[in-house]
Image (cartoon, rainbow, N blue to C red):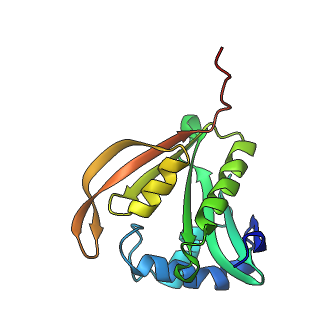
Amino acid sequence: MAPNDLLFRRARSDDWPAIWPIFREVVAGGDTYAYLPDTPEPVARELWMQPGANRRFTYVAESGDTIVATAYLKPNAIGLGDHICNAGWMVAPSASRQGIGRRFAEYVIAEAEAFGFVGMQFNAVVSTNIRAIRLWQSMGFEIAGTIPDAFRHNSTGLTAIHVMYRSLAPQQDQP
């Protein structure tokens, strides 16, 4: 895949048939998302697309005519906590290790900043997902806390999750 061959955009409802195989394959691994590995397609669509949700957006990354990744962006909490956003990414396993996740994350983070979110929080980064942790830390996220045994990993059993955070506030120049 050529580096300039990616297009990032908001997902449309008719993108779901191309998103579903990515969701199904990533979730079936039982090692990165808390969704049940056998999540039924209608439930997955509701969870990932959340049609009609306020300030909730789903995105896709396309290479040519093929959707190779998907993401969502939403407020992490309601009311007085809605200035911090939450997001999730899934890259098709066949398209992993090509820099798509980083470039897609940069795009979604820029969207979050444009929407006025002042921080981004990940509520459950599985501690064994070293590639994701390294990516997020390289993009300025810090581990804000760790919850032991919070995830039932498919192969390692009870596993810790990390809560990760990054400020999206404009950086002030230091005198």
Q: Position of residue 35 (x, y in %)?
A: 42, 71
Left or right: 3 in relation to 21: right
Q: Position of residue 55 (x, y in %)?
A: 68, 52
Corner quadrant of residue 64: bottom right
Q: Is residue 84 above or below residue 37?
A: above
- Residue at 72 percent across and 51 percent down: it is 111
Q: Position of residue 115 (x, y in %)?
A: 73, 44
Left or right: 59 in relation to 121: right
- Residue at 67 percent across and 24 percent down: it is 172
Left or right: 65 in relation to 36: right
Quadrant position of the N terminus in the picture: bottom right
Q: Is residue 62 above or below residue 77?
A: below
Q: Is residue 82 above or below residue 128?
A: above
- Residue at 47 percent across and 77 percent down: it is 26
Q: Nearer the viewer, residue 156 or 51?
A: 156
Name the outermost residue toward the front: 2
Q: Nearer the viewer, residue 172 or 148?
A: 172
- Residue at 72 percent across and 70 percent down: it is 3
